[in-house]
Amino acid sequence: MGKIVFGVDIGGTTVKLGMFDDQGVVLEKWEIPTRTENHGSLILADIAESVSVRMTDSGYSKEDVLGIGVGAPGPVDAKGTIGGAVNLGWGELNIAEILQPLAGVPVKAGNDANVAALGEMWKGGGQGCQDMVAVTLGTGVGGGIIVNGSLVSGYHGAGGEIGHMLVEEAETDSCNCGLRGCLEQYASAPGGVRLAKSRLAEEQAPSSLRTFKKLTCKDVWDAVKAGDAVAIEVAERFGYYLGKGLAAVASVVNPEAFVIGGGVSKAGEILFDYIAPQYQRFAFAGSRKARFLLAKLGNDAGIYGAAKLILQ
C-alpha cells in the first residue's frame, strides 16, 4: 500500500477530515462534532482518535502515514502555535505539539483561511497559479496569500487577514474585530445585506428587495441578475469596496489571480462585473493584469490545503 496523509479542517460546529494518497487524491471524507466544552480540550484528542480508527479500518499503519495537516480558525505561526480561537474555547496553544504525540505521526498546522487558499491553488480554482490571493466571502471576509507557491502567514500567523483592511474612514459602526471601516463590513454576506438596507432606507425607489422579510445577500445578487436598479446600485457599492481593497493587496503581493470563494461566490461570475472595474480603477499599473477566478473546492478546500501542508 502507498503512503497516505490526513487533512483536517477544524470548525466551530464540525471537524472535517480527509484521507488522501500521496498524489492528493482524496480516498475518504468524513466529519466529527467539534466538542468545545472544557475550553475545547477534547478537540485534538477526538481528531487523533478519529484518524486512528479510519487508518486502521482502511488497513494502514502509522508507518504508512506521512502526517496530519490541520487548519484552525485563528492566527497560527510556523511552529503550529495558535494565538487563540474563541469559538473553540481555545487560548494560546501549540496544535502540533499536542496532536503529534496523541496521533503518533507528524503534524503541521496553519490558519484555516490560509490553508484553504493552499487547497485552491493545489487542486481548485487557482490550480497552476504560484502567486495568488484566495478571498472567502462569507460571514466575514477571509484571505489567503500565496507567493511563489508558498503561504504567507506572517510572524504571528495573522497574514492574509484582508477582511480587516480599512476601506472606509467615515464608518461609525464597529466591525466584529473592534475596528471601524473594515472591508468585511461591506463585502461579506452580512455586509452586502447591510449595504442593501442602507440604500433602501435612503430613498423610496421601487425594488424587489423591499419584499423580503429577512433579506439575504443571495436575494441581493438574484435581484441584480434580474435587473433590479436598486440591487445594481448595491452591487456597485459592494464592488467598489472589494475592488479597492484587493487593489491594495495587489500593490503588496502582485498576484497572478484572485480566487473568490465562500457563500457569496455562489452568485457566480456576475460578481466580477462589479469587482473588476473598481479593481482596475485603484490598482497599480503593474498589477492590473490579475485575473478573477471562482473557487472550485467549496467546503473541501480546507482539508485539501491541510493535506498539502504535509505534502509540500
Image (cartoon, grey):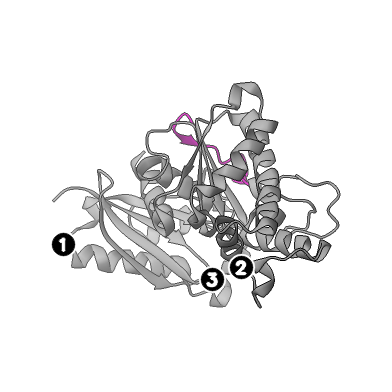
Picture residue at 43% right of the left edge, 59% below the top = 299
Calculate the distance from the C-alpha at mark 1 to the C-alpha at mark 2.
Answer: 46 Å
- Depth-wise, is mark 1 or mark 2 nearer the camera? 2
Residue 159, visible in the rendered structure: no
Picture residue at 39% right of the left edge, 57% below the top = 300
Mark 2: amino acid = Thr
State if disc 2 and disc 3 touch (CB < 8 Å): no
Q: Say whether disc 3 or disc 2 marks the residue closer to the N-terminus.
A: 3
The image shows residue 209 at horizontal and vertical percentages of 66, 67
Q: Say whether disc 3 or disc 1 marks the residue closer to the N-terminus.
A: 3
The image shows residue 89 at horizontal and vertical percentages of 59, 69
Numbered disc 3: secondary structure: helix
Q: In which quarter of the image is residue 91?
A: bottom right
State if disc 2 and disc 1 touch (CB < 8 Å): no
The quarter of the image holding the C terminus is top left
Q: Nearer the viewer, residue 214 or 204?
A: 204
Label 1, on which residue? 59
Q: Which of 80 and 221 is in front in this view?
A: 221
How many neighbours does mark 2 have within 10 angstroms: few (below 14), some (14-19), or many (20 or more)? some
Calculate the distance from the C-alpha at mark 3 to the C-alpha at mark 2.
Answer: 32 Å
Location of residue 66 with respect to 127 vertically, above or below: below
Give the total number of marks visible in the rendering: 3
Residue 59, visible in the rendered structure: yes
The image shows residue 307 at horizontal and vertical percentages of 36, 49
Picture residue at 52% right of the left edge, 43% below the top = 78
Any mark on residue 17, and which?
Answer: none
Please name the predominant secondary structure of the magenta segment in the image. loop
Q: Is residue 148 magenta?
A: yes
Q: Is residue 61 magenta?
A: no
Label 3, on which residue? 40
In this rendering, position of residue 29 left or right of residue 262 = left
Instruction: Give the residues drawn in magenta, as a range.
Output: 147-161
